[in-house]
Amino acid sequence: MSPSQKSLSIKQWSVDDRPREKLIHKGKSSLSDAELLAILIGSGNRDESAVELCKRVLHTSEHSLHKLAKFNLKQLQEFKGIGEAKAISILAALELGSRRGAEPLGELTKITSSKDVFRMMHPFIGDLDHEQFWVLMLNNSNKVIYKLPLSKGGITATMVDTRLVFKSALAQGATALILTHNHPSGALKPSQADIDITKKIKNAGELLDIKVLDHIIVTEKTYFSFADESLL
């Protein structure tokens, strides 16, 4: 793109350089992240095109969509040319992308390893700035039949309603459970509260013949498995 095009509106660019036209003629995969964001916001500011503005936004997030998804409404509005409506469009699009990654494809997902759990739950809790505790409910084939979000905020054994866990498990016909929660700090080592919760739910499950197969701690980049580390 020539320097003069930076100050032109998208409609004034050559057809090959317009993100919308590029998507139509060359397909969505041909667009850069900045071009896709530019389509969302539609226009830039007096000094930058939509694409140049979005390049600057992405540069601030180290060209990571995961990090951009952590921006809040106020942070996005700090960029000249991005008002509330544009910021909402960006956040909504990123949230849709996250939900798409978490959505099942129709068939029940079979859990064969701790990595399967990480892949399933990371889109839900991997990028959060607060802790969330979830319980995956499995059938006899180790396929996930239900995902129960149990609590938000700091996790302690007293905050986990064991009765709710097993009421839901019995209603779903689950034969096994996998516990999972995130550590926004990135720390992988389980806390004493994590250990206490695991023991509490595992002991309750033994009375109902519902096994706790694992407890996975999810961070932004990796995970910790109680089962893999022989802590169950």
Image: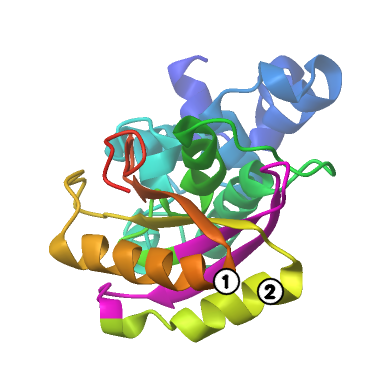
Magenta part of the protein: which range? 134-157
SS type, badge 2:
helix
Q: Position of residue 114 (x, y in %)?
A: 46, 35
Mark 2 or 1, nearer chain start: 2
* Helix, strand or loop status at disc 1: helix
- Residue 2 appears in the picture as rendered: yes
**Residue drawn where x is 48% and y is 65% of the image:** 206
Q: Are marks 2 and 1 in contact (CB under 8 Å)?
A: yes
Foreground label between 2 and 1: 1
Residue 42 visible within the image: no
Residue that label 1 marks: 208
The label shown at residue 164 is none
Left or right: 125 with respect to 94?
left
Q: Is residue 228 left or right of residue 145?
A: left
Q: Nearer the viewer, residue 170 or 188?
A: 170
Check residue 93 for magenta coloring.
Answer: no
Q: Residue at x 52, y 15 (%)?
A: 1
- Quadrant housing residue 164: bottom right
* Residue depicted at x 52% and y 56%: 211
Report which residue position mark 2 lands on. Answer: 170
Query: As shown in the figure, which amino acid type bears the numbered disc 1?
Result: Leu
| Left or right for 165, reference 152 | right
Q: Quadrant of residue 130?
A: bottom left
